[in-house]
Image: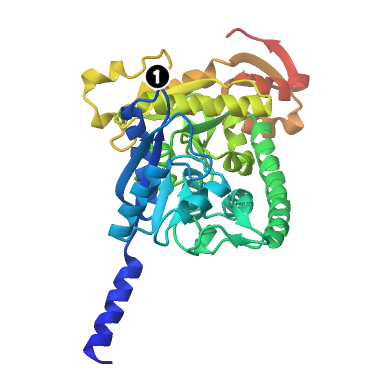
Amino acid sequence: MDTRNKNMDEITALQKNMPTQAILVARIEEGMTEENREKSLDELEQLLETAGGVCFARLSQTRPHPDVRTYLGSGKAEELSQLIKGNKITLIVVDDELSPSQIKNLEDAMETEVRVIDRTMLILDIFARNAVTSEGILQVEIAQLKYSMPRLLGKGTALSRLGGGIGTRGPGESKLETDRRHIKRRIAYLEEALREMDETRSIQRSARRSSGIPQIAIAGYTNVGKSTLLNHLTHANILSEDKLFATLDPTTRRLKLPTAGEVVLTDTVGFIQHLPHHLVEAFKSTLDEVVLADLILIILDASNPEVDHQLSVTEQILSALYAKRKAEPRPMLYVFNKCDRVEKKMLPLLTPRADTVYISAVTGEGIDTLIARIEKAVSECKKEVVFKFPNAFGGGYLNRLYKTSTVVSCDYASDGMLIRVIADEKIRSMYKEFLVEKGGN
């Protein structure tokens, strides 16, 4: 191989490894401030970087409604085209959800070949990159296919003229199916497989609940430190990275509290504003871990200037989940994480609530206080009672009660074993036929 060919091969390899350069496009709605628009674009840029791209420039337009054809007005579309042409940009990311025709028409309005994707496609792409378990991979692919199917032409030609890159990848870097007929069959197959997994998860969840061990869900905005906290509390070894949606698959671990017995902690997928509804539907079983928990730890990034907004988004998503599942809201404990990055005098200014704890999952600051608050929340629904079990089975019951409740005393008699415990409503209901005495709180 001569030097020239070798150099060309090296250049080609370098180009393949270079991140995709993109222009971020946004519309400033009526009543929206420039500051809020920039904050939304900041988050979009974070998403782009997580997907492996880099932002070359941002372009905004103030208009009350998006153009039905190209989203942007003709003048702004021409400005975008010239910016792309002069800098060899290959990707446009719009901070909104586009119709199939808007994607095609905006691409056609550009003088050079460029792909157009919207915020939803970008988030789906990140989920596809980060899905690890079989369940997570199925959930993401279903969401991607349902979103992409209306965005195909004819029998299945992709709207975008360039066939690869950010927004076109399925789970495991596979290329998404683009034949409409195949997509329908693929969705049906995936949904059936996911139903079987959902049934298994439901059985596992029921078994955990029937054990009487309190279920605690860790929820919150993406990249606030949920996995880091679970690692710290349970000494687990869960992937914890400083990027958006590093964790998609729920991870469940047990935690032995000092005086209130065991609890089960479940780390869940992070939230974000405008979370695609296809993802919410696909991750139904995963999100049920939050809706059906006995206690929810709402994790917040105390160092993020947008913490109030992120809390608002989190509460809105939870309210929507409760409404959709027709479930009662669960008790919540608000946990401000990353407090090691904030001046102590500023902490009281962070959305003060009675049910708030300030911690650092990295340094361990405030963790003892958090555990004490979890114990308090778990114990508030417990009462002291006495059960009388047959001697033949008393040992098994006693062993379970030691795991789920606080055993106060145990007395043996010829006609049975008397166990005085501080137990929650689930345990009291489970063993109500053996209940002989109700105590106080």
Corner quadrant of residue 401: top right
In percent of the image, x 40 and y 14: which residue is there? Answer: 353
In percent of the image, x 57 and y 32: which residue is there? Answer: 290
- Residue 156, given in percent of the width and then of the height, sits at 64, 61
Farthest residue in the top direction? 440
Q: Quadrant of the N terminus?
A: bottom left
Q: Residues within 10 Å of mark 1 (few under 14, many from 20)?
A: some
Farthest residue in the front direction? 75
Q: Name the secondary structure under disc 1.
A: strand
Q: Quadrant of the C terminus?
A: top right
Task: Say what amino acid the circle numbered 1 marks.
Answer: Thr
Relative to 395, residue 385 above or below: above
In percent of the image, x 62 and y 25: which residue is there? Answer: 322
- Seen from the viewer's position, the closer of residues 178 and 410 is 178
- Seen from the viewer's position, the closer of residues 190 and 232 is 190
Q: Count up the numbered dots.
A: 1
- Residue 143, given in percent of the width and then of the height, sits at 60, 48
Q: Is residue 49 visible?
A: no
Q: Is residue 162 left or right of residue 368?
A: right
According to the picture, the residue beneath numbered tag 1 turns out to be 356
Relative to 140, residue 158 above or below: below
- Seen from the viewer's position, the closer of residues 109 and 420 is 109
Q: Is residue 166 left or right of residue 422?
A: left
Q: Is residue 130 left or right of residue 277?
A: left
- Seen from the viewer's position, the closer of residues 250 and 122 is 122
- Residue 398, given in percent of the width and then of the height, sits at 64, 29
- Residue 223, given in percent of the width and then of the height, sits at 39, 39
Q: Is residue 378 visible?
A: yes
